[in-house]
Image: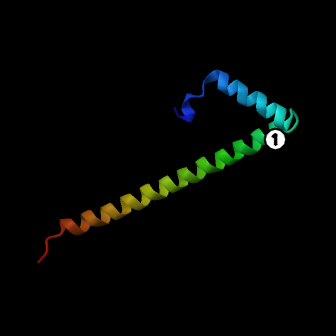
């Protein structure tokens, strides 16, 4: 049983506990901060993936050009 199987009742319980612990004034600030963190993480991950794709295609094109020429 993983974290993906929380369900609606579990989510409601988590929200109620968060309201009790942090209060209604602090909760939007926490949500905003976590949203910004998630956005930055996704952007960084996308940048790394695009760099990997760029690097991967560049090295494979170099390999194919060297393997196409006959060795004499």
Count of labels shown? 1
Picture coordinates of residue 64 (x, y %)?
25, 63
Query: Which residue of the protein is positioned furthest toward the left in this rendering?
Result: 72
Picture coordinates of residue 59 (x, y %)?
35, 64
Instruction: Give 72 or 55, whichever is nearer the viewer.
Output: 55
Residue 33 location, quadrant:
top right
Residue 25 location, quadrant:
top right
Question: What residue sits 64% from the left and 22% below the top?
Answer: 8
Q: Residues within 10 Å of mark 1 (few under 14, many from 20)?
A: few
Instruction: Give 65 or 46, whichever is nearer the viewer.
Output: 46
Query: Which residue of the protein is positioned furthest toward the top in this rendering?
Result: 9
Picture coordinates of residue 65 (x, y %)?
25, 66
Left or right, residue 63 beside residue 21: left
Left or right, residue 2 beside residue 9: left
Q: Which residue is mark 1?
A: 29
Instruction: Give 52 or 67, whichever is nearer the viewer.
Output: 52
Coloration mode: rainbow
Query: Which residue of the protein is positioned furthest toward the front in this rendering?
Result: 1
Left or right, residue 28 beside residue 61: right
| Element type at mark 1 | helix
Residue 3 location, quadrant:
top right
Quarter of the image with the C terminus is bottom left
Question: What residue sits 48% from the left and 58% below the top?
Answer: 51
Query: Which residue of the protein is positioned furthest toward the bottom in this rendering?
Result: 72
Left or right, residue 64 beside residue 1: left
Picture coordinates of residue 38 (x, y %)?
65, 45
Question: What residue sits 24% from the left and 69% below the top?
Answer: 66
Question: What residue sits 60% from the left and 28% below the top?
Answer: 6
Image position of 19 with respect to 9: above or below: below
């Amino acid at each position: 049983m993983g974290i993906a199987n929380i369900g609606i009742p579990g989510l409601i319980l988590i929200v109620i506990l968060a309201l009790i612990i942090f209060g209604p004034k602090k909760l939007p600030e926490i949500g905003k901060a976590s949203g910004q963190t998630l956005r930055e993480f996704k952007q960084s991950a996308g940048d790394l993936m695009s760099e990997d794709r760029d690097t991967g295609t560049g090295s494979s094109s170099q390999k194919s050009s060297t393997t196409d020429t006959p060795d004499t």
